[in-house]
Image: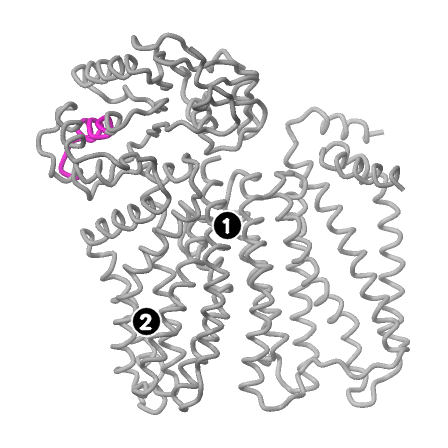
Amino acid sequence: MKSNIYNWFFLILRRDLLIASRRSSTYITPLIFFLIVISFFPIALSPDQEFLRSLAPGVIWIAALLSSLLAIETIFSEDFRDGTLDEFFISNDPSFVLVFAKVLCHWLVTGFPILIASIISSLILYLPFNSLMPMICSLILGTFFMSLLGAIGAALSLGKSAILSAIIVLPFSIPTLLMGTAAVASAIDYQDYSGFLLIMGAMLAIGIPGLCLLTVEAILLNYE
Amino acid sequence: MLPKLKVSNLSCTRAGNLLFNNLNFEVNAGQNIEIIGSNGSGKTTLLRILLGLIHIGKGDMEWLDNKDNYNQFRDMECFYQGHSLGIKNLLSAEENLRLSSFSFGVSEEKIHSSLDRVGIERHSALASELSVGQKKRISIARWLLKDFGIYFIDEPFSALDDEASNLIEEIIEELNKKGASFVITGHRPSNVVSSQINLDHEV
Amino acid sequence: MNKMWNYIKDWFIEMGSPPLFFKWSSKVLPWLIFTTIIIFALGLTWGLFYSPTDYKQGDVYRIIYIHVPSAILGQSIFMFMAVCGFITMVWRVKISGMLLKAAAPIGASFTLLALLTGSIWGKPTWGTWWVWDARLTSTLILFFIYAAIIGLHSSIDDKSKADRAISILSIVGIAIIPIIKKSVDWWQTLHQPSTFSLTSAPSMTPDMYQPLLVCVLGFYLMFALLLTMNLRAEVIVREKNKSWVSKQYLSEDK
């Protein structure tokens, strides 16, 4: 049976999920980092309940952005070092599908901890309960887009400092940040927030093929 | 028999230095080629150009397909092992073989028999618990999974004891009889190859 | 017609070779310097000294003759960089990668100039040095993206690889920048109920408008001049081991 791109896609998912399940730091550290960042805000600013409630959507989103960015940093470095990444590019199959498999797996492993951390944070920042579901939906869409952007940042700065990857990725994540916080903020006021989620979905729809193609080019640069 | 791969007038410049100029060679069925050179002479670069990891600058590569025509694109299944082995530390020996991209459609018995052939006893031991030599044997086990057309191996004999080197030579001979060819790199000429490309002399 | 088209095509192919580009640009450079200085000086003196005083803002609005052209240049240069990046990635042309690298600091400087002049404009009209106005914020984000591009290029040692890396980044940038601008626009209307934005231009009569056009043209010429000079320096640095460089410098030592 000749290798089929679908089989290969699921093979990569299985392999990376198996490896991530054996290294618990992959999914614990984003959660802890998220909570640490969140705790800085009451500590540095003010623990007043009303004040924190007004800050909550933005602060949760900023923590999600930073956790997502730092978590995706190492997506390609291990595979590049042990030679597994080369296999993607020497076959005749479209490699951006395989890169997408890696990003999807990475998001599945780091996205759920971030979601759980955000639910905990909504309690400790007194976020109104009615906006919890919209926050989760916006975070699902937003962290996935962040993972795609972070993959390009990781590929371009493979082997260099994480902070370089951060300056590359963070300006491009501003629309996601704006839409996400807007979704949560309008949900708090019982207003319609579906438009923001639709825009984030549209960004994902264009981003998945476009960013994965560019990520392939960025990874290939490292072989020259 | 037609050669499986024809390379003509291949040249490559890396960081301003000319690595090799107007390289010509052919890879025939059942025969092996070794690319020799000192460190930095471009062995890994040449291998990567042949596989398509690096854009081919000047020169031509033609691959034989099933209908005995030559194409720019490769149709046959090839195996590649880079300088780092392609073995994941957190997976066991059999998982490394089962979840490898070279193992589609390979049965469980084939995986276990390949591991036995290369002398790995505990198939479910995590690769992180094994020595470097044993990890190298696991990567060799992948060669036996399917019938590949050409094997591109970067430095197969490095850091190996005599027993393991003999094992590799045996396996290479077996696979040659089935019609597979090997393109390997190394520092010194080895016994299994029929022709050599010395990159130190090719500039 | 066909002959002219062939001539243009041949010129493009020739420009891809560094020594030929250098020779051509040495011939063109004096004319470029001359034209740039004339139009730049003309535009600025006309705008800063001879255009009529605005009814609402007084003489302060004159900074528009520097602010608007530098903002326009900052954005146009990014589009130019994205086109160069696309050409570098698809056709593997070396000179477009060098153009991209040479244009980046120029674009960043124009964007920074737009931010500073916008800030200077804001102080007398609104009383603060900075306001999170939609245009200033999106110009600030554009500056961050320029900084990321320059930073990425300097972090990669192999310079032709670095060119291709920033090509990828500029392609991502050109796709995301319209989205950033739209979302920042929307965000600003949400939080600032007043519709009068800080740096909105006064409604302009022709005698205010004409020096502005001349200034924009002067800034574009200035960009062409700076780009050519920067690219010449870049070509010399990259090809310094080649024989034509020593011949060039030896021949200029008349």
Q: Which mark, residue B189?
A: none
> In the rendered view, would you say C213 is above or below B136?
below
Residue tagged by mark 2?
Answer: A37
**Amino acid type, mark 1:** Leu
What kind of element bears circle 1?
Answer: helix
User: Image quadrant of residue C237?
Assistant: top right
Residue A52 lies, in percent from the top left, at: 34, 86
- The magenta-colored residue range is B128-141
Q: Give the class, few, some or many, for how many residues have Cα within 10 Å of label 2's Cα (few <14, many ≥20).
A: some
Residues at marks 2 and 1, CA–CA distance in whole angstroms: 31 Å
Residue A175 lies, in percent from the top left, at: 50, 70
Main SS, magenta residues: helix
Chain to which the residue tagged by mark 1 belongs: A
Q: Residue at x 48, y 75 (%)?
A: A178
Residue tagged by mark 1?
Answer: A214
Residue A82 vs residue B25: left or right?
A: left
| Tag in front: 2 or 1 | 1
B201 in magenta: no
**Which corner quadrant holds the N terminus of chain C?**
top right
B139 in magenta: yes
Residue A174 vs residue C22: left or right?
A: left
What kind of element bears circle 2?
Answer: helix
Q: Give the class, few, some or many, for how many residues have Cα within 10 Å of label 1's Cα (few <14, many ≥20).
A: many
> In the rendered view, would you say B189 is above or below C119?
above
Residue B151 vs residue C181: left or right?
A: left
**Which corner quadrant holds the C terminus of chain C?**
top right
Chain to which the residue tagged by mark 2 belongs: A
> In the rendered view, would you say A181 is above or below A141?
below
User: Image quadrant of residue C70?
Assistant: bottom right
Residue C208 lies, in percent from the top left, at: 86, 77
